[in-house]
């Protein structure tokens, strides 16, 4: 169960001062609109929500300002809440899962009488696919830990109290004057442990799967600033845990030669995560992809391109990685990954005149749908402590401002390769 607390605004018991009658019409409008006390509430009501989606909606839509245009407020707040939720789900579904390619790849050398040997000295990239397959009868198992603390959406900070949802202004001789500002502080964190496996059913075909186990926490406060007096309107917190959207993968090595290769593949994401608790997208998706790799000496370059159908939005994706062999046991890796969504929510502002009141307007945060792009960089290393074990660590940096973003996303993974 998830709790949200509401603090209702009380009517002012103090009568209006007679001196207001002699003021100008503009000042009368401001006084009538803002004549509610800034003091604390007398009673506290508790609202229970069952899911993180309801918690987010409660924070966005709960208001205690009786004189606002409630239908427009509700519509704008609902659109904003939906965009934040979709941005989180999109962020979770597009944060790259570790590559299905094993760090240790093998091939049968027919010229040497069928001897099995390493196909590459490189352990491969983190998230970008590579054309090499693990080898028939061989496989790998891995565990990846990742922490994400989202701090902004569409370039607007969520955590420092400057995320404005509603602003009211009145016309004045010296220019528009702000008399009512509502802000939201929102902290969204996710922790994931992804279990993955990959197996070579032939020398050219790999199959794999990834199961993400997620924990999503959300807490925030909505505050009204009226004439410099701040009043807490709502606060809520909630946590949800469970499996995310399972990924199934297949890859076929079309062409291979010493130092380079081409593969085709596909990744399906199943709607196994709880959408209402922001653990899954609620829709299946399929992403065909093409992979090209080249290796020269101590440097390997891998690229992959794909197009995802379904999910929250169709997406054109791309990734490229450069792996540098430092020592036989240590690799340094840099990657870029990105994509363009066909249609996804973007926050925007809508300004309307206050009904029945001259010179007063309200600007509300709302959302619109349009094509958006994302771009990330990754840097880190892979280390072979012994046998066929790999330990890797990297940091992902989001460079675009579209959707929910985090400054840094640390990832740690352990992989074990096995087979005959």
Image (tube, rainbow, N blue to C red):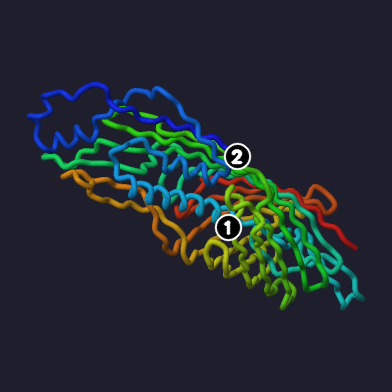
* 143 on left or right of 226: right
Which of the pair 256/60 is nearer the observer?
Answer: 60
Q: Position of residue 349 (x, y in %)?
A: 33, 51
Residue 353 numbered mark, or none: none
Which image quarter holds the N terminus? Answer: top right
Q: Residue at x 65, y 56 (%)?
A: 245
- The residue carrying pointer 2 sits among few (fewer than 14), some (14 to 19) or many (20 or more) residues within 10 Å by Cα, namely some
Is residue 163 visible from the viewing direction of this image? Answer: yes
Q: Secondary structure at mark 2?
A: strand
Which residue bears the numbered disc 1? Answer: 94
Looking at the image, is 218 positioned above or below residue 144? above
Is residue 324 visible from the viewing direction of this image? Answer: no
Residue 239 numbered mark, or none: 2
Are dots 2 and 1 in contact, CB under 8 Å? no
Residue most extreme to the right: 113
Q: Position of residue 201 (x, y in %)?
A: 82, 70
Give the image quarter of residue 105: bottom right
Which image quarter holds the C terminus? Answer: bottom right
Q: Residue at x 42, y 43 (%)?
A: 61
Q: Residue at x 23, y 46 (%)?
A: 354
Looking at the image, is 321 positioned above or below residue 407? below
Q: Position of residue 57 (x, y in %)?
A: 47, 45
* 287 on left or right of 201: left
Q: How far separated are the C-alphas under marks 2 and 1? A: 21 Å
Looking at the image, is 297 positioned above or below residue 252? above
Of tags 2 and 1, which is closer to the observer? Answer: 2
Which of the pair 250/398 is nearer the observer?
Answer: 250
* First in sequence: mark 2 vs mark 1: 1
- The residue carrying pointer 1 sits among few (fewer than 14), some (14 to 19) or many (20 or more) residues within 10 Å by Cα, namely some
Which of the pair 160/14 is nearer the observer?
Answer: 14
């Amino acid at each position: 169960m998830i709790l949200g607390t509401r603090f209702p605004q009380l009517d002012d018991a103090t009568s209006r001062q007679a001196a207001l009658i002699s003021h100008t019409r503009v000042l009368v409008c401001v006084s009538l609109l803002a004549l509610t006390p800034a003091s604390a509430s007398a009673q506290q009501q508790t609202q229970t929500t069952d899911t993180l989606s309801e918690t987010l909606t409660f924070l966005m839509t709960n208001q205690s300002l009786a004189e606002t245009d409630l239908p427009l407020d509700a519509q704008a707040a609902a659109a904003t809440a939906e965009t934040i939720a979709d941005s989180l789900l999109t962020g979770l579904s597009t944060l790259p899962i570790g590559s299905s390619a094993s760090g240790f790849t093998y091939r049968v050398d027919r010229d040497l009488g069928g001897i099995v040997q390493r196909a590459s000295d490189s352990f491969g990239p983190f998230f970008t696919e590579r054309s090499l397959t693990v080898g028939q009868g061989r496989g790998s198992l891995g565990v990846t830990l990742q922490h994400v603390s989202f701090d902004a959406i569409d370039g607007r900070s969520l955590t420092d109290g400057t995320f404005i949802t509603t602003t009211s202004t009145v016309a004045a001789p010296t220019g528009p004057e702000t008399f009512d500002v509502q802000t939201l502080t929102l902290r969204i964190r996710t922790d994931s442990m992804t279990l993955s496996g990959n197996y070579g059913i032939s020398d050219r075909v790999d199959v794999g799967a990834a199961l993400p186990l997620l924990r999503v926490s959300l807490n925030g406060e909505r505050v009204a600033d009226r004439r410099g007096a701040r009043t807490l309107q709502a606060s809520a917190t909630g946590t949800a845990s469970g499996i995310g959207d399972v990924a199934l993968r297949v890859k076929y090595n079309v062409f291979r030669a010493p130092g380079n290769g081409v593969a085709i593949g596909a990744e399906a994401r199943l709607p196994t995560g709880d959408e209402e608790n922001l653990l899954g997208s609620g829709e299946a998706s399929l992403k065909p992809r093409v992979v090209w790799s080249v290796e020269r000496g101590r440097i390997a370059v891998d690229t992959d391109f794909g197009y995802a159908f379904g999910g929250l939005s169709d997406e054109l994706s791309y990734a490229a990685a450069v792996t540098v062999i430092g020592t036989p046991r240590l690799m340094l890796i840099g990657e870029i990954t990105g994509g363009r969504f066909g249609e996804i929510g973007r926050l925007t502002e809508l300004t309307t005149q206050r009904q029945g009141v001259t010179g007063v307007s309200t600007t509300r945060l709302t959302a619109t749908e349009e094509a958006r792009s994302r771009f990330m960089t990754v840097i880190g290393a892979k280390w072979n402590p012994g046998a066929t074990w790999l330990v890797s660590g990297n940091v992902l940096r989001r460079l675009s401002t579209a959707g929910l973003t985090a400054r840094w996303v640390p990832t740690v993974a352990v992989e074990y390769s096995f087979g005959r």
